Amino acid sequence: QVQLVESGGGLVQAGGSLRLSCAASGSIFYINRMGWYRQAPGKQRELVASITSGGRTNYADSVKGRFTISRDNAKNTVFLQMNSLKPEDTAVYYCNADRSPISYWGQGTQVTVSS
């Protein structure tokens, strides 16, 4: 089992910044990739950014240049730095850990960007 605890969501004005954190605990060995997904009301959950155990990153086109994913292996924590936030970034953000064949999810943290 892997437990994921997210923090850092909140309300911010357009153009502002937020930093999300996801702390992993439990059976964290063999986690291949960690990522952030988001789900807005009435929409499907979508990948925002991911980072492999080797540090390779991947971003959704909509956040490239604005969001940065990073990890602190010593603290088993993944971060998502979100800059230049837009109202369309409003969603519940979920942390994900891929420990194939099982995928683990955090409880989600709300990010609201006001115009």
Image: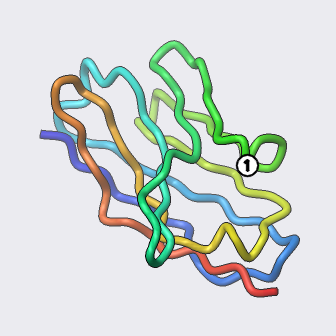
Q: Name above or below for residue 75 compared with residue 7.
A: above
Closer to us: 13 or 25: 13
Q: Is residue 115 left or right of residue 34?
A: right
Residue at image mark 1: 63
- Horizontal placement of 47 versus 4: left or right? right
Q: Count neighbours of disc 1 (C-alpha within 10 A) and say few if under 14, some if 14 to 19, many if 20 or more.
A: some
* Position of residue 110 measured from the top left corner of the image (x, y, whole percent): 50, 75
Residue farthest to the top? Answer: 54
Colouring mode (rainbow / by chain / secondary structure / one colour): rainbow
Return the x and y of residue 35 as percentages of the image width and height: 47, 40
Residue in view at x 46 percent, y 68 percent: 43
Q: Is residue 66 above or below residue 60?
A: below
In this view, the residue farthest toward the left is: 1
Q: Residue at x 62, y 80 (%)?
A: 112
The amino acid marked with disc number 1 is: Val
Quadrant, the N terminus: top left
For residue 16, above or below residue 21: below
Residue 88: give x, y in percent of width and height: 70, 71
**Residue at 59% over, 18% down:** 56
Quarter of the rendering containing residue 55:
top right
The part of the image, by quadrant, that contains residue 71 is: top right
Please, what secondary structure does the residue beneath circle 1 have?
A: helix
Residue 84 higher or lower than 53, as above or below: below
